[in-house]
Image (cartoon, rainbow, N blue to C red):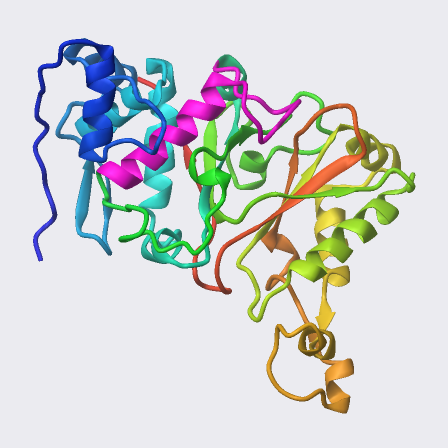
């Protein structure tokens, strides 16, 4: 099978309203209005990334689709991005094209995963990617449009259309945009990209096929163990019939202060969560997540959320106020899809 290629075309419209309706009619929008691209705006995106229109950013093996810079630039303009956002989008697309991310599964499953993006390094501050208040909510152009641009590429270039290739039963709001930064300035821990071998002065984006954030509340505990006990209880309830590849643990401001005061490292958090988020097979059968009658040995046969403590990814982010944190389940089984971190390169 030869790689799928398509040519861009131009359209004459009378005004902005007519342009918006054209994009709806053609099925090129995610349901929200888009910015109609022009030759000048497309060129600005390409110049910001140092790429030419025919340069291949990634190749989606399962779809036999070559994702070229020109197509990405068009969708990035449509999403409302500034040109300086383009290198982040390029790196994220390299991530989802990586065989470890395994595009076909998370993009087509009925399980409803979205593309979670975590931006680290100097570029996060330069682009004002939000890592604080209203972390997963609206209000920040960079967060909103960077995530949206990648989803538009998935839709318009790779062909991941809802109800067709995208077979999500429910989906979630992260399918519009699911992009945050880590609060490296106030975090007591090394940032995720440094944990993964990058230097602090490098910028990187981590992509994960992920379900929606699950917020948990604990204002009663003033210890790290108490807070994580609550988190693990919530995670046990979210367990399915197969271990997830990875979980993200988002530690917000008030909770982060408790961990810092007690000197807990990210490795400490990962080990505690791994040991305390396990469920017995008997419990999974009681709540109808495993088939069959409960056998005596099921009470002591334990099921782990992930394969190892390292499969918990700890992120410092969220508001300084409020005793809330969150976890984000990855999509699929142990080998279905794993997170990938790529360097963000600027021209």
Location of the N terminus (image quadrant)? bottom left
Q: Residue at x 60, y 43 (%)?
A: 213
Image spot of residue 318 (x, y percent): 67, 28
Image spot of residue 125 (x, y percent): 54, 16
> Horizontally, is 51 left or right of 291 in the view?
left
Q: Is residue 59 visible?
A: yes
Q: Which quadrant holds residue 346?
A: top left
> Horizontally, is 118 left or right of 247 in the view?
left
Q: Nearer the viewer, residue 74 or 26?
A: 26
Q: Is residue 340 above or below residue 21?
A: below
- Per the image, is 130 magenta? yes
Q: Is residue 56 visible?
A: no
> Horizontally, is 200 left or right of 345 in the view?
right
Q: Which quadrant holds residue 153?
A: top left
Q: Is residue 11 above or below residue 115?
A: above
Q: Which quadrant holds residue 242?
A: bottom right
> Horizontally, is 52 left or right of 83 in the view?
left
Q: Residue at x 66, y 67 (%)?
A: 304
Location of the C terminus (image quadrant)? top left
Q: Residue at x 48, y 61 (%)?
A: 332
Q: Is residue 337 above or below residue 345?
A: below
Image spot of residue 111 (x, y percent): 46, 58
Q: Nearer the viewer, residue 73 or 211?
A: 211
Q: Nearer the viewer, residue 41 or 187?
A: 41
Image spot of residue 325 (x, y percent): 72, 38
Q: Nearer the viewer, residue 323 or 275?
A: 323
- Per the image, is 67 magenta? no
Tell me which segment is drawn in magenta: 127-156
């Amino acid at each position: 099978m030869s790689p799928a290629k398509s040519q861009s075309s131009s359209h004459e419209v009378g005004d902005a309203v007519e342009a918006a309706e054209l994009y709806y009619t053609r099925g090129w929008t995610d349901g929200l209005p888009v910015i109609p691209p022009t030759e000048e705006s497309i060129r600005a995106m390409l110049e910001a990334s140092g790429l030419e229109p025919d340069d291949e950013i990634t190749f989606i093996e399962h779809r036999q689709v070559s994702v070229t810079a020109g197509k990405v630039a068009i969708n990035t303009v449509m999403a409302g991005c500034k040109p300086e956002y383009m290198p982040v989008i390029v790196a994220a697309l390299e991530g989802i094209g990586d065989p470890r991310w395994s595009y076909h599964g998370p993009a087509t499953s009925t399980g409803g995963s979205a593309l979670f993006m975590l931006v680290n390094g100097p570029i996060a501050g330069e682009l004002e990617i939000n890592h604080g208040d209203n972390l997963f909510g609206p209000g920040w152009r960079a967060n909103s449009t960077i995530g949206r641009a990648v989803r538009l590429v998935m839709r318009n270039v790779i062909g991941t259309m809802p109800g067709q290739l995208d077979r999500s039963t429910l989906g979630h709001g992260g399918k519009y945009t699911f992009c945050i930064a880590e609060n490296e300035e106030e975090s007591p821990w090394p940032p995720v990209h440094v944990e993964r071998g990058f230097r602090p002065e490098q910028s990187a984006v981590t992509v994960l096929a992920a379900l929606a954030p699950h917020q948990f509340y604990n204002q009663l505990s003033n210890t790290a163990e108490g807070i994580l006990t609550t988190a693990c209880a919530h995670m046990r309830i979210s367990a399915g019939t197969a271990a997830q590849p990875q979980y993200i643990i988002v530690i917000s401001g008030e909770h982060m202060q408790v961990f810092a005061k007690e000197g807990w490292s990210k490795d400490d958090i990962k080990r505690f969560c791994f040991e305390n988020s396990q469920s017995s097979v008997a419990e999974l059968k009681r709540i109808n997540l495993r088939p069959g009658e409960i056998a005596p040995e099921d009470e002591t046969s334990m099921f782990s959320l992930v394969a190892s403590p390292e499969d918990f990814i700890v992120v410092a982010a969220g508001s300084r106020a409020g005793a809330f944190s969150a976890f984000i389940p990855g999509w699929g089984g142990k080998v279905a899809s794993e997170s990938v971190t790529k360097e963000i390169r600027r021209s």
